[in-house]
Amino acid sequence: MVDATPGLLTSLNTGSVNGGLGERVLIDYKDAIIDYKVTDLPAMQFFADPMTTDTGGNIDITFNRPSMKLERIEEGNTPQYQHTKLRSERISVKEWGIAVGVTRRMIEDSRFNEIEMALNEARRAVDRHMTEHVVKVVFGGSADSTFGTIAIDANTSESDITTFSTNPYGGFFGSGMTAADINATGSRLNSYGNESDDRLIRDMYYKAAGGALSGGDGEFALSDVVKGIDRIATHGYNASHIFISPAHYQSLLNLGDFVTAFTAAQGGVGGAGATTTAAMAAGSPVAQTASTGVVGSLYGLDVVVNAYVPSDRFGIFDLSVKPMAYVERRALTVEEANPGFGIVGSYMSMRYGLKIVRPEVGAICIAMA
């Protein structure tokens, strides 16, 4: 004997106006599956300058450096012949893949579209992978054996960042540079305008004004934002975006709503000193909210908040010039292992490489002791 299993409208409401024994509902598994929230950060659109290539292996990209100079000549003389200086960046192309575990029996016995669900999740897995890869390269937040990234902070030297064998993804300017590195052969640092050597050799990974994190909240000081803007401008670029985590956004809202006073001396939350509102005059961080993650404007910079950004650092960038090159050797394709059976036993793979090739257009503020 098998007891009847009630549907969602159980016998508790039998005879009620909203349901009853005759209105019990049986739900198909297909209708009961609820998709999870997908966190989106169009990392490639923000940070990468995409290009394709028909050759495999490592790809070399060449950049022109400032090298020629107009000279005054005397009557009857000719100027000296000058040549163009070049800088080369090597991008390592790797293959990445994902195997979707769909069998013939799953397709035949499933009460919902197993292939559609598997392919949708595989697509989202690729999106998550690309976003995580780009973020770890751009923000330098952690060493990852899967991606091959290294942890970069305010003490990481320029030589560690540019050593291809241990860090194939590059980074922004590191510490330890001297005036001799400006315009030197093999150096990424070029002179610009009338900027002094001391301003040019400042690294792009710098310690936050407030030091280490406190209570799990993102360390955020307006003086740190100004510092990043200045370091990017030193090399002839104008900062356009600031990327922060939800923890930093909370700190920013405390400033924007004046829940906590910030000092004129350090532009941060708390501390002693006279308060000021001048720093927020350029715009409110809660002026707008959009699906792109742009939540407002600060000093003319679009503020983008996303959970992929590390909570112990935020970045300031001039995204009119993309800091990263993305080389795609082969787009995502299905390698069909069993012809005629589609995705059964097959896998998807792609070949790509990426690297920070313009170290002047980004600055990373790091909360560290």
Image (tube, helix red, strand yellow):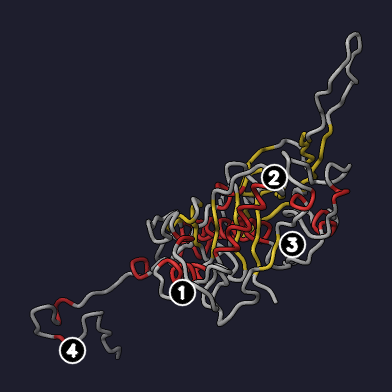
| Residue identifier under label 3 | 149
Q: Earlier in the sequence, mark 4 or mark 3?
A: 4
Which numbered dot is residue 12? 4
Which numbered dot is residue 261? 1
From mark 3 to mark 1, how far is it between C-alphas? Answer: 38 Å
The residue at 75%/56% (across/down) is: 202
Q: Earlier in the sequence, mark 2 or mark 1?
A: 2
The percent position of residue 272, horizontal first and vertical second, equals: 54, 78
The secondary element bearing badge 3 is classed as loop
The secondary element bearing badge 2 is classed as loop
The percent position of residue 310, horizontal first and vertical second, equals: 60, 67
The percent position of residue 124, horizontal first and vertical second, equals: 52, 58
Amino acid carrying label 3: it is: Thr
The residue at 28%/89% (across/down) is: 3
Q: Nearest to the eye among marks 2 and 3: give it.
A: 2
Is mark 3 in CB contact (under 8 Å) with mark 1?
Answer: no
Amino acid carrying label 2: it is: His
Q: Nearer the viewer, residue 264 or 14?
A: 264
From mark 2 to mark 3, how far is it between C-alphas? Answer: 26 Å
Amino acid carrying label 1: it is: Ala
